[in-house]
Image (tube, rainbow, N blue to C red):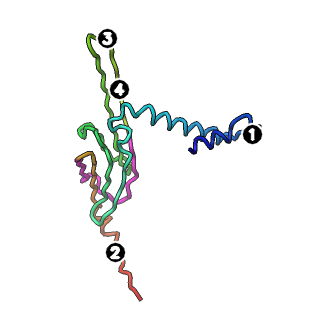
């Protein structure tokens, strides 16, 4: 309904000046609407893939979990570069039906990045994927473990 409110605000017959940011915001809303509409018939997990991405820090590891439903885990590309974890996926599929009368092509890709905290030993990072959940564990370096310590809070 936010889209309708914006449309009402910039309708020309109200004789009201239109702000540039209103037009840009309306454009973005319409683009999102078309993206959702056009992706839904072909959705096989690509639109949702990588949307759920969270990072948890423990005393031993940093754990990143990414939802990648419906994707082939062997085609996932996971890299750490300059302190940034990058997860990407790309797939292309072409087909022809009965006697070459019809043909189609589908291309899907996604890319997610997350900045990592300093002090991780990325050479010992491990990644597993099970039931559409990609889990990446990166241990803290020994230096980082030594630099941090738990502070006991006293209660008065």
If you read the primary sequence from the N terminus, does the residue marked by circle 4 or circle 2 appear first?
4
The residue depicted at 32 percent of the width and 53 percent of the height is 64
The residue depicted at 30 percent of the width and 69 percent of the height is 146
30 vs 113, nearest the viewer: 30
At label 2, counting other C-alpha atoms closer than 10 Å, the crowd grade (few under 14, some 14-19, many 20 or more) is few
The residue depicted at 33 percent of the width and 62 percent of the height is 57
155 displayed left or right of 9: left
Give x and y (percent) for residue 87: 34, 43
If you read the primary sequence from the N terminus, does the residue marked by circle 2 or circle 3 appear first?
3
Give x and y (percent) for residue 105: 34, 22
118 vs 12, nearest the viewer: 12
Residue annotated with mark 3: 101
Give x and y (percent) for residue 23: 64, 38
Q: Which mark is residue 106?
A: 4
Give the foreground label among 2 and 3: 3
Stretch of the chain drawn in magenta? 111-130
Residue annotated with mark 1: 17
């Amino acid at each position: 309904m936010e889209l309708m409110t914006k449309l009402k605000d910039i309708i020309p017959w109200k004789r009201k000046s239109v702000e540039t940011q209103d037009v840009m915001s309306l454009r973005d809303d319409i683009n999102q609407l078309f993206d959702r509409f056009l992706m839904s018939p072909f959705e096989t997990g690509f639109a949702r893939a990588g949307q759920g991405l969270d990072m948890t820090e423990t005393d031993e590891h940093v754990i990143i979990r990414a939802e990648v439903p419906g994707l082939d885990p062997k085609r996932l590309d996971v890299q750490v570069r300059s302190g940034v974890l990058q997860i990407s996926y790309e797939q292309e599929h072409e087909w022809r039906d009965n006697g070459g009368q019809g043909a189609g092509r589908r291309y899907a890709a996604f890319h997610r990045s997350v900045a990592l905290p300093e002090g991780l030993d990325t050479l010992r990072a491990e990644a597993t994927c099970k039931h559409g959940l990609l889990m990446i564990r990166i241990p803290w370096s020994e230096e980082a473990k030594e630099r941090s310590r738990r502070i006991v809070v006293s209660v008065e």
